[in-house]
Image: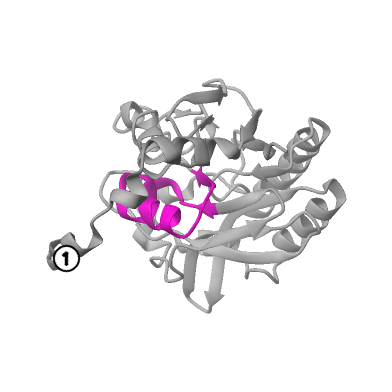
Amino acid sequence: MPRITRAALIQASNALPNSDDLDAIKSAMIDKHVALIKQAASEGANVCCLQEIFYGPYFCAEQDTRWYNLAEPIPDGPTIRLMQDLAAQHKMVMVVPIYEVDMTGVYYNTAAVIDEQGQYLGKYRKHHIPHCHPGFWEKFYFKPGNGGYPVFETRYGKIGVYICYDRHFPEGARALGLNGAEIVFNPSATVAGLSEYLWKLEQPAHAVANQYFVGAINRVGTEAPWNIGEFYGQSYFCNPRGQIVAEASRTDDEVVIADLDLDLIREVRDVWQFYRDRRPESYDDLFDF
């Protein structure tokens, strides 16, 4: 019997673009996403992934300690508990990226993974933290991830997560494949200009090199007061051949739905034997730089 997973990506703009009230922004963004999650469920989604730190703007455009107040513990914070309830209600696996506080003064950019019964399975902490371009001051907010590249066994496939800037690094993408990932989600917040030409290049390349499905999510709109550029949406799914099979618009709040045939992974790997033909014993020099 074919293994078909109906997967969803949610891209959204800031619900309160003119507000400076952190609690109001967070509440409005959660409310917006609850409705979009319900839409994904109504369209039969088995798995749903939200965008990077879904409940706020991309606050890394400035360096201000007030944004630390958006962070919550995982899994014991209110947002993850709410998402566990929604996952159980909709019988849907959820990938939920939020701002995590691990202990006082220690914060991570993290995605929690919840199964269709509402059980917390674990989390992925973003490994690669940029601090290199005006408007991307992430080292001020996030400690680099320390939990490896976990893959979560779910009813609807083996799920891995890579977050935004991670996508520029092939090593973690390979580790997810070696750990058994069948679908890798990359929730992001990225603007037009510097990296847009890479958006549909790098992640299909990861899908081809590692022979799994990729779900790439980006938010939409511009965010005052920083106005660092247009978040250009275009969230998409690509298959293990690197072909884009579903794609969102550039400007709209949207739920992207795709039916992913997980049996295609074996079909592709039986043709292109990348895992058989790897030569890890010859790669030692990669660790000397």
Q: Please determine whether, in this image, residue 153 is positioned above or below residue 209.
A: below
Q: In this view, does 268 lie above or below 108?
A: above
- Give the residue displayed 55% in from the left and 70% down from the top: 101
Residue 274: image x %, image y %? Answer: 33, 45
Measuring from the top left, give residue 284's x and y in whole percent. Answer: 16, 65
The three-letter amino acid code for the residue at tag 1 is Asp
Q: Give the range drawn in magenta.
A: 160-187
User: Percent from the top left, x then y, of residue 117?
Assistant: 81, 58
Q: Does residue 15 appear in the picture of this structure? A: no
Q: What element carries label 1?
A: helix
Q: In which quarter of the image is the C terminus?
A: bottom left
Quadrant of the snapshot with the N terminus: top right
Q: Is residue 36 visible?
A: yes
The verdict on residue 284 being magenta is no
Q: Mark 1 points at which residue?
A: 284
Q: How many marks?
A: 1
* Location of residue 8 with respect to 84 vertically, above or below: above
Furthest residue in direction front, as rendered: 270
Q: In which quarter of the image is residue 46?
A: top right
